Image (cartoon, grey):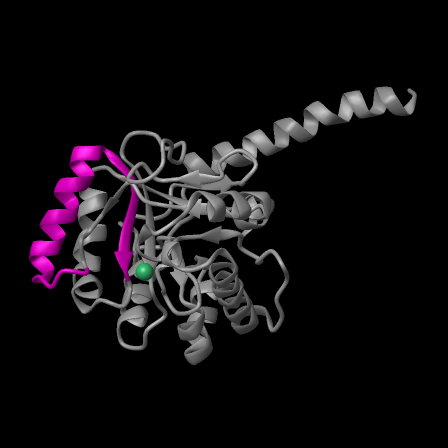
Amino acid sequence: MNDRMKQRSVLPLVALALTVRVAYAQTEPVPCPGNPDALGTARTLAVDAATLPRVGRKHFPQTLPLAPKEVVLTFDDGPEPGTTPRVLDALRRECVRASFFLLGRSAVAHPELARRERDEGHTVAHHTFAHPLLSRMSTAAALAEIDRGFAAVDGALYGRSDHVPQTPFFRFPGFASSPVLLDLLERRGVVVFGTDLWASDWNRMAPEQELKLVLDRIEATRGGIVLFHDTKRQTAAMLPAFLRALRSRGYRVVHVVPAGESAAALAR
Ligand SMILES: [Zn+2]
């Protein structure tokens, strides 16, 4: 058998092995220690700027390729002592993996919380250094703010930073994007996350009220990317009941990871 024939005979086997592995991840959730009734994480979805440069129907024409009743849970503006640990505790109890969009200044102030998010299997992504509305700044100033956020988060997590962050996922503060910034991020391979729905948790309300509001919206859209803030006490308070409600209503959690990390995430 020559080399080319060997390649031909091996490649389908590799493809089959990957397919089996993905199918396993989707249909046989990993048991959740101490909680046999856990919501769990149904599957991992690799996202790449080359195919999905921006996602979330609130602001963009397309979103993640999710099935009906699948949700991606995202948390912005942290990490914050007090509330972020409560959010992480609730997610851990249910073996749910989420995505956190961090402020660089908060990662610098609380690097141990950023590392806990990473160490517990969550995706740790970016939300600028100090949360300005980038659409109101010069392009150069906006890019500097974005890069300072990338460097601060990666510095807290890995002790170093590159031109493209380890996790190339970014969300604009206040969704205040501009065409030129979107184009520059796409060319750098950074996926911009909008959202499909939100909990409106920037408005003060009782946790029970927030729970009802977000569940009603999820039922209306049949799932999608959900935006919360792990800096909000009312969100931390409602999260355990929210995750139980997702389970009882038959929703499944999808964990988004950068494309290059999907194999590693499946292996975890
Ligand atoms: Zn924000």
Q: Is residue 256 visible?
A: no
Q: Is residue 80 above or below residue 102?
A: below
Q: Is residue 204 magenta?
A: yes
Q: Position of residue 128 (x, y in %)?
A: 43, 63
Which one is in front, 32 or 167? Answer: 167
Taking the view exactly as shown, the residue that stands out farthest to the bottom is 109
Taking the view exactly as shown, the residue that stands out farthest to the right is 2
Looking at the image, which residue is at 23% across and 51% down? 243
Looking at the image, which residue is at 17% across and 65% down? 237
Which one is in front, 179 or 232? Answer: 179
**Number of dots carrying numbers:** 0
Which quadrant of the frame does ligand 1 lie within?
bottom left
Residue 124 lies left or right of residue 17; in this view the side is left
Which one is in front, 48 or 147? Answer: 147
Quadrant for residue 174, please give it: bottom left
Magenta region: which residues? 202-229
Q: Position of residue 155 (x, y in %)?
A: 56, 72
Q: Is residue 247 magenta?
A: no
Q: Position of residue 244 (x, y in %)?
A: 20, 51
> Quarter holding the N terminus?
top right
Q: Is residue 104 visible?
A: yes
Taking the view exactly as shown, the residue that stands out farthest to the front is 138
Residue 199 lies left or right of residue 35; in this view the side is left
Quadrant for residue 220, please give it: top left
Looking at the image, which residue is at 54% across and 47% down? 184
